[in-house]
Image (tube, rainbow, N blue to C red):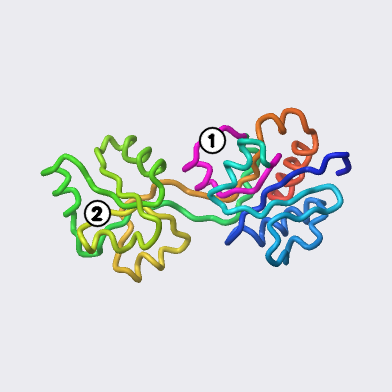
């Protein structure tokens, strides 16, 4: 990939980072130094400029043109709902959004819903949760939290929670049981709308990534 202007790529911090770097390397990009960047958040190689970004901010960087393309979890895409192009399902980083309630609740949430006409749900993911309950035709009052979602039903803050999980272990350890699935999430390769249209390098990279995933 050679061009006068480096291709700007956002790579998510956290659980998707290592597999993202490995996949970009297999796709033929020069990722020298990216696997162990230290405190650097921006790193330039032969043809690319990499930005190491908080996962929830990746859609913003991509949609508004801060980067040309990126790897991002579908959970962040669904929650942000921004204008960008989803190009390849990369098939790693699998997790799911679930509805959970205390193990001994035994339909108490439904009973309270029938009495009050509204269900109170704690979550970090307001957009995804609202869309899910709208589809179900259930009136909800959302309680937006930034952590420790599991505590909400046990102190009367909420009837249920909507949270993201890979194994369900944290929920079980906190005496919560899953009562429904909301959506599945995996890592995706995404692009800025204008960049995808005008820069053939992004489309070529998407094709290589798709081939690697299939292979």
Query: Who's the residue at 36% across and 54% down the image?
Result: 145
- Residue 82, numbered label: 1
Q: Splitting the image into 4 quarters, where does residue 17 fall?
A: bottom right
In the picture, measured across the screen, residue 77 lies left or right of residue 108, that is right
In the picture, measured across the screen, residue 7 lies left or right of residue 90, that is right
Query: Who's the residue at 72% across and 54% down the image?
Result: 42
Q: Nearer the viewer, residue 215 or 176?
A: 176
In the picture, measured across the screen, residue 147 lies left or right of residue 158, that is right
Name the quadrant of the N terminus. Answer: top right
The number of numbered badges drawn on the structure is 2
Question: Residue 113: horizontal and vertical position, in percent?
Answer: 17, 45
Highlighted range, magenta: 67-84
Question: Residue 131: horizontal and vertical position, in percent?
Answer: 38, 38
Q: Splitting the image into 4 quarters, where does residue 132 fall?
A: top left
- Magenta stretch holds residue 72: yes
Question: Residue 81: horizontal and vertical position, in percent?
Answer: 50, 37
- Magenta stretch holds residue 143: no
Please name the residue that numbered disc 2 is placed on.
Answer: 158
Mark 2 near mark 1, Cβ–Cβ under 8 Å? no
């Amino acid at each position: 990939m050679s061009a006068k202007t480096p291709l700007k790529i956002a790579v998510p911090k956290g659980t998707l980072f290592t597999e993202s770097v490995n996949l970009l390397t297999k796709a033929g990009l020069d990722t020298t130094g990216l696997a162990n960047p230290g405190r650097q958040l921006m790193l330039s190689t032969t043809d690319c400029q990499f930005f190491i970004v908080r996962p929830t901010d990746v859609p913003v960087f991509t949609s508004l043109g801060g980067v040309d393309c990126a790897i991002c979890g579908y959970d962040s895409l669904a929650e942000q709902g921004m204008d960008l192009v989803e190009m390849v399902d990369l098939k790693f980083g699998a997790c799911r959004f679930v509805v959970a309630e205390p193990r001994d609740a035994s339909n108490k949430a439904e009973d309270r819903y029938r009495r009050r006409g509204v269900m109170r749900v704690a979550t970090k993911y307001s957009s995804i949760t609202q869309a899910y309950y709208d589809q179900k035709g259930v009136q909800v009052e959302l309680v937006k939290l930034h952590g420790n979602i599991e505590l909400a039903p046990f102190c009367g803050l909420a009837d249920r929670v909507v949270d993201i999980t890979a194994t369900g272990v944290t929920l079980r350890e906190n005496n919560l049981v899953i009562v429904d699935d909301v959506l599945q999430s995996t890592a995706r390769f995404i692009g800025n709308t204008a960049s995808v249209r005008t820069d053939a390098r992004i489309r070529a990279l998407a094709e290589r990534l798709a081939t690697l995933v299939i292979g």
